[in-house]
């Protein structure tokens, strides 16, 4: 074993906080929310049409960035949780594998490795 001293309860507490905050972010940034903003700009007809077009362009441009943020949060919580469980079970190599898969999932948005190999429950 390495010289690390992981405290699972504290890691779980941080991961729980991250999940709650991520859920709040997801709830605030729905397509319906964005559509409501665009609909709200339609009141002025031709006067506000360009504003709605500009806001829509910004939202479209940023949607990829928002998806990437979501992927990184999800990958981080899955990877850290699984790595800590593996580490606590004395499976240091598996812990490292989870860390590597965390990085791959964050980039790709593909979480199948954790579905297939992650700890359940």
Image (cartoon, helix red, strand yellow):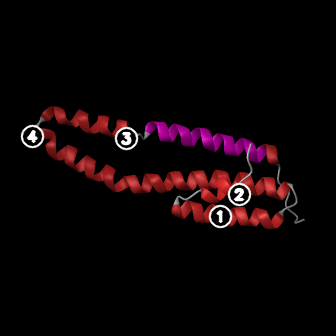
Which residue is rendered at x = 58% and y = 61% of the image? 105
Q: Is residue 56 magenta?
A: no
| Residue under numbered circle 2 | 117
| Residue under numbered circle 3 | 31
Determine contact: label 2, label 4, CB under 8 Å.
Answer: no
Query: CA–CA distance between discs 2 and 4?
Result: 55 Å
Q: Range of the magenta residues?
A: 10-28
Mark 2 or mark 4: which comes first in sequence? 4
| Residue under numbered circle 4 | 46
Q: Is residue 27 magenta?
A: yes
Identify the mark at residue 3; answer none if there is no mark. none
Query: CA–CA distance between discs 3 and 2?
Result: 32 Å
Please identify, in this view, whether the residue under mark 2 or under mark 4 is nearer the observer.
2
Q: Chief secondary structure of the magenta span?
A: helix
In terms of secondary structure, where does tag 1 sit? helix
In terms of secondary structure, where does tag 4 sit? helix
Q: Residues within 10 Å of mark 4 (few under 14, many from 20)?
A: few
Q: Quadrant of the N terminus?
A: bottom right
Please identify, in this view, whether the residue under mark 4 or under mark 3 is nearer the observer.
3
| Residue under numbered circle 1 | 101
Query: CA–CA distance between discs 1 and 2?
Result: 10 Å
In terms of secondary structure, where does tag 3 sit? helix
């Amino acid at each position: 074993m390495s010289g690390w001293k992981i405290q699972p309860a504290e890691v779980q507490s941080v991961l729980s906080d991250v999940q709650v905050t991520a859920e709040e972010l997801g709830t605030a940034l729905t397509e319906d929310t964005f559509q409501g903003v665009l609909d709200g700009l339609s009141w002025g007809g031709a006067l506000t049409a360009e504003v709605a077009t500009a806001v829509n362009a910004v939202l479209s441009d940023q949607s990829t960035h928002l998806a990437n943020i979501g992927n990184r949060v999800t990958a981080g919580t899955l990877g850290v949780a699984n790595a800590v469980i593996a580490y606590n079970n004395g499976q240091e190599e598996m812990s490292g594998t989870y860390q590597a898969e965390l990085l791959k999932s964050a980039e790709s948005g593909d979480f199948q490795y954790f579905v297939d190999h992650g700890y359940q429950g």
